[in-house]
Image (cartoon, rainbow, N blue to C red):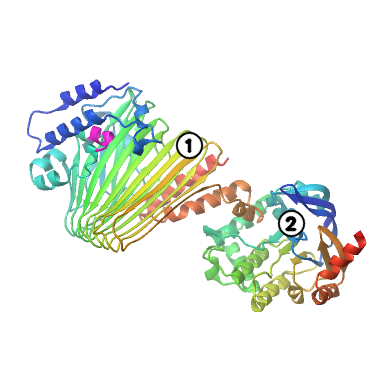
Amino acid sequence: MLTIQNLHAGIEGKKILNGINLDIKKGEVHAIMGPNGSGKSTLASVLAGRSDYEVLDGTVEFLGKDLLEMSPEQRAAEGLFLAFQYPVEIPGLNTVNFIKTAVNEIRKYRGEAPLDAVSFLKKMKEKMALVNIEQTLLSRSLNEGFSGGEKKRNEVFQMAMLEPRLAILDETDSGLDIDAIRIVSNGVNKLRNKDNAILVVTHYQRLLDYIVPDFVHVLYNGRIVKSGPKELALELEERGYDFIKNENKAEVA
Amino acid sequence: MNTFAYFKERFEQLQPQEDQGGLDKLREHAFQAFSQMGIPGSKHEEWKYTRVAGLFNREFQLPADPLTGSISAEDLKRLRLPGHEQASEMVFVNGFYSFALSRIRSSGLQVLALEEAAKNGFRETVSKWLGDSGQYQKDGINALNTAFVHGAVFIHVDKEQHVEHPIYIYHITDARSVNILSQPRSLMFVNEGARLQVVENYATLGNNESFTNQVMEIIVDHEARLEYYKIQNDGPHTNQVSTTHIRQIGGCFTHTVTISLNGGLVRNNLNVVLDAKNCEAHLYGLYFQSGRSHIDNHTIVDNIKPNCLSNELYKGILNEQATGVFNGKIFVRQPAQKTNAYQSNKNILLSDSCSVNTKPQLEIFADDVKCTHGCTVGRLNEEGLFYLQSRGISEKTARNLLLSAYASDILEQIKPEPLRRYVEKLIHHRLEKDLS
């Protein structure tokens, strides 16, 4: 589904990613872990198409197409979704109208007719139940004054509405207490199926207790330095990131 | 070019012989003030960024009579705003009030020629409040209007009268054959406990230049409620200085919304004097300018008496080579203790060649007051733009949504539903056009 080869990228002249290779197949859940500053969020941003990041080398293929040549909205329409670490508050933009616009712009891109009001409402009710989000929240301006947990639930709700093929969850657990993590994770798990894939970007192992990955990758200095099964996350939790740093120092030496 | 000699000649021609209920004296004083000050130039602190004097490099004609015959009912029909169906309409043509085109349909609402009002039933009210702004003593452009008070009206809302539909005021300038300077003038008295909504709109016919130099003075009495909406969406060859002077003489409520979407040079002077205890004033504005248009909002909230509240929010969007000015003064005089005064001005610049000058000014002489002010100038929120795009929304639609969202809290302040929908649509069309 997603194939990243030798990806180098940076921001404002500072190089952050130094040759990432990653292959994600449908039905899989991958986790990317790593210490602060290792490039986790940069990778998520580059994949979603944030314009202030500059791709210096490498290729990214998504469902057989060149992802890096697409605008952010094309990527979304092709089935990529980024759950933001810090969802943006937009006063004056009604959440439901926003989601309706997004759903219909994607349908338009795919050559489908826009959803009529009734079908949209039906779909919305269904997904609201699935990810446990209240109508009152959706009647408000987009993320304005939402708590951390509400913002993340709204991200998962948008994911449910847009039904992406690949969802990237960028530090979705940051700033959440354990109950909120559980609610958000339950939502994500309900959206998992054999045709989609999830890339979880996280600093801590705890989120992976709820969203259980098939593969764990450790990112350090802009490269994936270790990959393994889900147990690798537990090892990192136990030993901290220092052993990764030490191993890599040793290699360099 | 309009020289002083031109105005002097016109002034002398226009002075009528019969009794004018004191208007003749006011004109005389104003003309003297005008001859001393002239049209303010860019060295004048209040006109630094708005080069109104430059407009007079062209030759304008100051009409001698209403020329109402030139505006047909058909013309008017095309200019009407939604929601007018049952409403009273007041029509000014080239600055002169047209009784023929106007329709007053609300009971308790009287519209009289200012001379009539000054001579007869409202002599005292007119002589007390006309020229109340006193601004003509300090401001040459106001003096120019005041020197030529002709075809002006007095509007009276009776005590406890709740006027059901908004009054629509249309200022039509007929510039089909020459450049026109029109100078509408009105005085409104909103009596105790009365309620009224006013919608004001400007339209120029023809492709010659127009310059509307308007002064409106409004007195609002105890427990009255006034909503005042100004919609400016005229062509690029139209210019205006629009002075609205509101004095609240009893504990009462005013709510003004100024929407400026077009025009060549537009300068709004909105002065609100809180001259009684427990007054409340809300001032909202939205300007969205493109091309080479210029918008200037000068507001004054003058707190004279204690326990008043004012809240002001002006938002701007500037594009292409447009220029903007915001100047918001709040005065809190020594007796005006327990004043609450809030002011905010926000601006979004969409191009590299547009600009805005924003200046809040607080002068506080009382010690027990709460005042805040702030202004921002920035670009469209890039993070918000990316957020929307990452959901599959095209860049153009995303910009449109973000700007509509930005404007929404001002548009919500337009209480009459048909008018709000109309303005929303205008803005929507503008966004479609400007962002393509």
For marks 1 and 2, give the CA distance: 37 Å
Q: Position of residue B87 (x, y in %)?
A: 28, 49
Q: In front: B252, or A223?
A: A223
Amino acid on which disc 2 is placed: Thr
Q: Quadrant of the C terminus of chain A?
A: bottom right
Magenta-tinted stretch: B138-145
Amino acid on which disc 1 is placed: Ala
Q: Residues within 10 Å of mark 2 (few under 14, many from 20)?
A: many
Q: Tell me the chief SS of the magenta region.
A: helix
Q: In front: B208, or B211?
A: B211
**Left or right, residue A63 beside residue B161:** right
Q: Quadrant of the N terminus of chain A?
A: bottom right
Residue at position x 82%, y 62% in the image: A220
Q: Residues within 10 Å of mark 1 (few under 14, many from 20)?
A: many
Q: Please tell me in which quadrant of the rendered image residue A209 appears.
A: bottom right
Q: Which residue is mark 2?
A: A42
**Left or right, residue B434 beside residue B188:** right
Q: In front: A160, or B358?
A: B358
Q: Position of residue A231 (x, y in %)?
A: 85, 75
The circle drawn on residue B254 is none
The mark lying in front, picked from 1 and 2, is 2
Can you see residue B106? yes
Label 2: which secondary element: helix
Q: Position of residue B148 (x, y in %)?
A: 20, 32
Q: Chain of mark 2?
A: A
Q: Which residue is mark 1?
A: B322
Residue at position x 34%, y 29% in the image: B53
Label 1: which secondary element: loop
